Amino acid sequence: ESSAMAGLSVAAKVLFVQFEQWGRGGVLWQTVLGSALCTLALFFAVAYLLRRTGAQNLFDAFDQLLGRKGGGVCKLALCAAQGVGMVLVTHSFCTALKRYSMVNTPVWFILALLLGAALPAAWMGLEIVGRQAKILLDFFVLAAAVAVLGASWSYEGYRLYPLLGEGG
């Protein structure tokens, strides 16, 4: 379940790249791929840390490694980073919905619908969110595969060049 949550988080970041960046040239796809790979590397590093320390969660691992005060500082930093990440992905998702399917809908209404669906699951706990992610991951992989394979006839690979960006 935690792997499914991590996978969906990476996929959300990859898919909902800020729309203002699409006009910046052929290097954007490398940036998105690099971001996804860094996120996966971080996930595996945290999994290794938890396995190595025997901690049940990341907060316990922080306390074991850094003591109570150092662990508290790391806990606050992690919570702040998670909050910022949540806001950025939610903003990107709302922007995508407004731009492509709910054109005349105000952003606050889209956000209210999204939070109305997400908050009850979050209130019930991480286990419920993990189970939902595990169920949704299969549908997401299927939808992504259909989208990629369905559009493969129109791919023009030369448009990705120059591969290393402008002048690289």
Image (cartoon, rainbow, N blue to C red):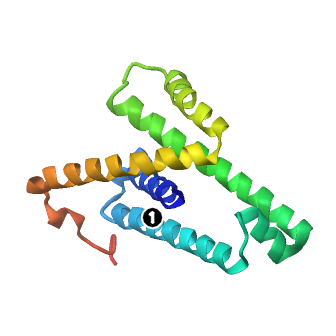
**Residue 87: x, y in percent?**
60, 43
In the image, residue 146 lies at what x, y percent? 20, 50
Looking at the image, residue 49 lies above or below residue 86: below
Left or right position of 159 against 164: left
State the SS at label 1: helix
Q: Is residue 55 left or right of residue 22?
A: right
**Residue closest to the eye, 135 or 45:** 135
Look at the picture and state if 51 lies above or below 74. below
Of residue 168 and residue 124, the one placed in the foreground of this image is 124
In the image, is 160 to the left or to the right of 63? left
Q: Residue at x 61, y 77 (%)?
A: 48
Q: Is residue 12 visible?
A: yes
Task: Give the residue at x 71% y 65%.
Answer: 56
Q: Residues within 10 Å of mark 1 (few under 14, many from 20)?
A: some
The amino acid sitting under disc 1 is Ala
Q: Position of residue 54 (x, y in %)?
A: 71, 75
Front-most of 114 and 156? 114
Residue at 73% over, 70% down: 55
Residue lying furthest bottom: 52
Residue 97 image position (x, y, % from top left): 40, 32
Q: Residue at x 48, y 44 (%)?
A: 132
Farthest residue toward the right? 69
In the picture of the structure, the residue carrying the numbered disc 1 is 36
Specify the quadrant of the image occupied by residue 72. Answer: bottom right
